[in-house]
DNA sequence: TAACAGTAGTGAATGCCATTGACTAAGCTG
DNA sequence: CAGCTTAGTCAATGGCATTCACTACTGTTA
């Protein structure tokens, strides 16, 4: 028996060459996102990507020029997951709330991917959709021109920064747990308590914090300022 | 002249063994920060750290167990740079503004370092100082107990997230420039403009944006909500 | 002053990783 | 069916963090 050809299903055997259209940007991005979810950021290597897709480690280079470009594509995918299914509600405030919460939950569900991408400008189609949706709601709030763009940045930058930072913290915790580290609580125990009276007094309260509630507080602060200032303009 | 001892300033010669107390956490952190400033994140390697300090590449392992721990120490250093010289002003709002702007400017001045650290909990002494300073101002605003801690998180999380994200974007741009890439503007040019009317209409206005002004808008939104809610409580 | 202990600094592996360039063959074009 | 383009493969290459055994400095104790 020659070894020139082997069955695909043969266990553990060296795989035959992949067919021509087997790999696409889409499948690679999906695999990358899955790997990030399962193994965190250091887990995303060309070797693992190849194994996951049944391809040679370097096959991705036919579709992306570098690891960073794959990440950028994942970024746009994440934005797409956030707005898929979004419909503007009657109230512009509810529309923006919806968009804000969607970003939070998408990032929280894919912390490793979000960590590496939330601060990147993808220039992809989904980013455009999202920018357009936010601007649309802000126009309904009564803003136009430069000031609408200003409010757009205040809102979208808040949403991306805080949701992304939350994801980054979740990712750090997951990786530290993966490395066998025990859990750290959001607590502070100073060596010289007398120097930090407010920290000491608040120690108990630091435990009871719900991060999504804090996010909601930040979003409401921006939205209510947006509404208040728009009203002032109208008068 | 024997070569058992050589002048520190001797150019290019193989260095003699370093004296015993030459390396400290402090000097290593300072060198790491300098390297991050000059060469960006991928520039921070044990090799370069060694060269910078005139030590063997692995010498740092006597002071830090891993690269990540060095980064954590840099994080606390950055927080320290932010609050050094801070004095509470009479107005609690001005105090928080001051702290917010300090963080922004420190992060903006050290973008690579900030990028890797702003979302980390350092548990270092400077972090404690900062937490205490913020809580102190929030107490003067009229908040106590759990609600003070809630407001603390709303404020500090906003400041760290948005200042840190800004730093991350600056760092990305610097590294892309270092790689010879040309500048990218904050612009959007959709392939099918008719699908993104608001983006198209706003294209010109995207150019005129001052990021620090946006940050100020976000900080004011949170501060004014904090003030408003505190007043409601008092009544 | 002479051993000695502890440990800071060194230097040579090790193993993982992204990226490159040459090679192979699959499928289109004529 | 000959030839071309290019997706997929394979074997380097060079950089990196980390480990481990080694060396010698400094302070302690006799």
Image (tube, coloured by chain):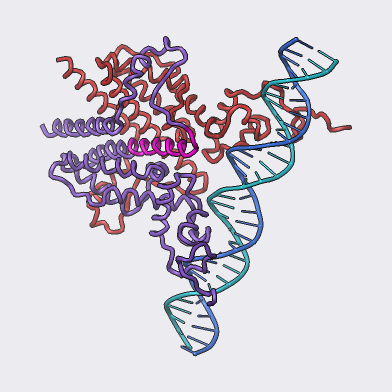
Chain colours: A red, B purple, C blue, D cyan
Q: Within the image, what quadrant is residue A46 found in?
A: top right
Residue A114, compared with residue A87, is above or below; it is: below
What is the x, y in percent for residue A191? 31, 58
* Most foreground residue, B228 or B182: B182
Q: Residue at x 39, y 53 (%)?
A: B73
Picture mark count: 0
Q: Magenta residues, as a range?
A: B161-181
Q: Is residue B56 above or below residue B112?
A: below
Which image quadrant: the C terminus of chain B?
Answer: top left
Measuring 58% from the left and 24% from the top, which residue is drawn there? A25
Q: Position of residue B158 (x, y in %)?
A: 30, 36
Residue B68 horizontal/vertical position (percent): 46, 50
- Residue A2 shown left or right of residue A92 in the figure: right
Asked if residue B167 is among those painted magenta in the image, a careful observer would answer yes
- Is B199 within the magenta? no
State the residue at coordinates (37%, 46%): B121
Farthest residue, direction right: A1
Vertical position of residue B186 compared to residue B8: above or below: above
Q: Is residue B58 left or right of residue C21?
A: left
Q: Main secondary structure of the magenta part?
A: helix
Q: Residue B6: x, y in percent?
A: 49, 71
Name the residue nearer the viewer: B67 or D11.
D11
Q: Quadrant of residue A97?
A: top left
Q: Residue furthest left?
A: B235
């Amino acid at each position: 028996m020659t070894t020139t050809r082997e069955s695909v299903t043969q266990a553990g055997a060296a795989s035959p060459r992949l067919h021509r259209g087997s790999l696409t940007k889409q499948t690679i991005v999906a695999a990358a996102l899955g790997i990030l979810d399962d193994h965190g950021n250091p887990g995303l290597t060309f070797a693992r990507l190849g194994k996951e897709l049944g391809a040679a480690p370097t096959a991705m280079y036919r579709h992306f020029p570098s690891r960073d470009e794959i990440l950028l594509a994942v970024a746009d995918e994440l934005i797409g997951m956030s707005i898929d299914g979004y419909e503007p509600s009657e109230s512009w405030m509810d529309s923006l709330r919806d968009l804000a919460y969607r970003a939070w939950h998408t990032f929280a569900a894919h912390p490793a991917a979000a960590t590496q991408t939330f601060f990147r400008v993808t220039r992809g189609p989904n980013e455009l959709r999202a920018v357009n949706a936010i601007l649309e709601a802000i126009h309904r709030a009564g803003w136009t021109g430069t000031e609408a763009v200003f409010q757009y940045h205040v809102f979208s930058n808040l949403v991306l920064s805080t949701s992304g930072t939350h994801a980054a913290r979740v990712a750090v915790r997951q990786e530290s747990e993966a490395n066998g580290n025990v859990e750290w609580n959001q607590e502070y125990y100073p060596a010289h308590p007398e120097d930090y009276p407010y920290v000491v007094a608040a120690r108990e309260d630091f435990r009871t914090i719900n991060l999504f509630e804090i996010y909601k507080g930040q979003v409401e602060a921006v939205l209510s300022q947006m509404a208040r200032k728009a009203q002032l303009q109208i008068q």
